[in-house]
Image (cartoon, rainbow, N blue to C red):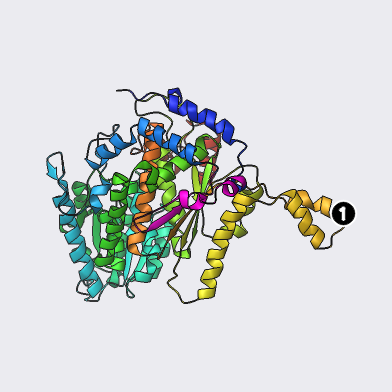
Amino acid sequence: MLTPSLTSTATFQALETHAVDAEDWQMRGLFGADPQRFERLSVEAAGLFLDYSKNRLDGRTLDMLAALARERGVEARRDAMFAGEKINLTEQRAVLHTALRAPRDLALTVDGQDVAADVHAVLRRVHAFSDAVRSGAWQGYTGKPITDIVNIGIGGSDLGPKMVCLSLRQYAHPRLRMHFVSNVDGHDIDAALQQVNPETTLFIIASKTFTTAETMMNAQAARAWFLQSASEAELSRHFVAVSTNVEAIKTFGIDPQNMFPFWDWVGGRYSVWSAIGLPVALAVGYGYFADFLAGAHAMDLHFKEAPFEQNMPVILALVGFWNRQFLGCTSVSIAPYHQDLNRFPAYLQQLDMESNGKRVTRAGLPVDTPTCPVIWGDTGTNGQHAYFQLLHQGTDVTPIDFIAVLRPAHELENQHAALLANCFAQSEAFMKGKTQDEVRIDLQQQGLSLAEIENLAPHKTFPGNRPSNTILMDYLNPFNLGSLIALYEHKTFVQGVIWDVNSFDQWGVELGKVLAKRIEAELTGTPAPSEHDSSTNGLIARARAAD
Ligand code: F6P
């Protein structure tokens, strides 16, 4: 049955009317009117606490948004996803990253395959292999233990394992240095190879399709580099693959024994839970990798079972939808107040923007509302000294997700208090702002003249009323990190259902890939091309001239 267009539904129209009333709401006033606002508009689940009280909405807004989510079929679509139905319609695939972190007794078959049996068979191999490498039992061709692991992959085959390894660096094996090579820019692999020794380096070639141009080029470069020192027979101790494409890995020259498989029902940006997470298991050990999966599973259970009004991913999605649709926010900034989460915004960019950066509905009709906002950000407090100026006083309103960890892994207590103080102060400043009158009083107290006060006051005024969420966790540990990622996965899913887009394909990346192939040939071949527009022809000509 065709899903009705979003704007045609009565609930959406009621929300539009409600949003007109909400235009004048000031969060200062909302907090003043309801001393219980923080308790009411916060939720705890699976090791995480979400405070969404600093948004320009009230309980009625949320009730209406929850009704919209129900009407759009979020429950049925969620259940269809967990049940392995082929909800990725354009590729006719199931979407089962949740099965990758489910217990062994999950009863689920896809195309006649027992999913849990397959998943746990691969997990056992990941366990055995990571134990062998970490203990030193797995040795390089001269009998030395592995010291360096180079993961070669891009997109989901890079961002997830890289972000998680960085985030969990406190748990990492002291002997193993992790390197991540993704860019087709030769400087990337070149920099990694300069740091490692072929005798003690393990390469993981990570690619779902095993056809991605960047990964294949980097893998060939690594192979050629390795063969300068060792023989073909020794490749098998130094090259393993993670892929769904066994034929391609054989053609590349990797022993199928050294391949860790996964399945077409794992999307690239949802794949860190699969064998694509092998670098994580190697770095932190299988026990912590299992905790990471358990954290995500705990969030899955919460997402499946909690009523929408107390469901953290659903709430995060609804608040985000409200800000996008009714406050007109075109981007969302992610601000982790933990240095080890510094790749988390980049990870979320792919998760959210590749999933919901769509302009047609599942039926192929143009959407009638804006969809995914731009996701960007950096760690606090660094961002405060760079772009927060715009967030506080610029003309666009950009909602922020603050992410903070209550207990540090270091013993510099004062620094941690300073970090948390900054995080909470920012959300307070975005919410409250500072009125011209407050600025004037401040300046008077500083003894400025009336003329100086009048000159400075407009510049020092903060509009405030700017929305933010704050996510807290006790520790940045594997369980909580798993839960955090799953929270955002499900948030993305719920928004995709509301917009009625297919969150699980990514056709938008294809055109550039095709054109790049053609231009690559033209850059090196003869004669020079002239079939493009004058700009592209001109750029190609300049590059050829630089040869
Ligand atoms: O081109 C986009 C994309 O397909 C992403 O969705 C994916 O994560 C990435 O490329 C890498 O793909 P693969 O794992 O097949 O190399």
Label 1 residue near ligand 1, CB within 8 Å: no
Which residue range is magenta in the image?
29-55
Q: Is residue 457 left or right of residue 286?
A: right
In this rendering, is residue 172 above or below 76?
below
* Label 1 SS: helix
In this rendering, is residue 370 above or below 226?
above
In this rendering, is residue 325 above or below 243?
above
At 53% across and 34% down in the image, what residue appears?
Answer: 326
Quadrant of the frame with the N terminus: top left
Please tell me whether residue 37 belongs to the stretch shown in magenta: yes
Residue 268 x %, y %:
32, 47
Tell me the residue that label 1 is attached to. 450
Comparing 105 with 152, the one in front is 105
Please tell me whether residue 363 belongs to the stretch shown in magenta: no
Residue 188 x %, y %:
42, 59
Q: Confirm whether residue 387 shows in the render.
A: no
Q: Is residue 213 left or right of residue 251?
A: right
So how many labels did they put on this image? 1
At 54% across and 39% down in the image, what residue appears?
Answer: 330
- Neighbours of disc 1 within 10 Å: few (<14), some (14-19), many (20+): few
Residue flagged by tag 1: what amino acid is it? Leu
Residue 352 x %, y %:
42, 44
User: In the picture, residue 398 is in which quadrant?
Assistant: top right
Q: Confirm whether residue 124 shows in the render.
A: yes
At 28% across and 57% down in the image, what residue appears?
Answer: 293
Residue 456 x %, y %:
79, 53
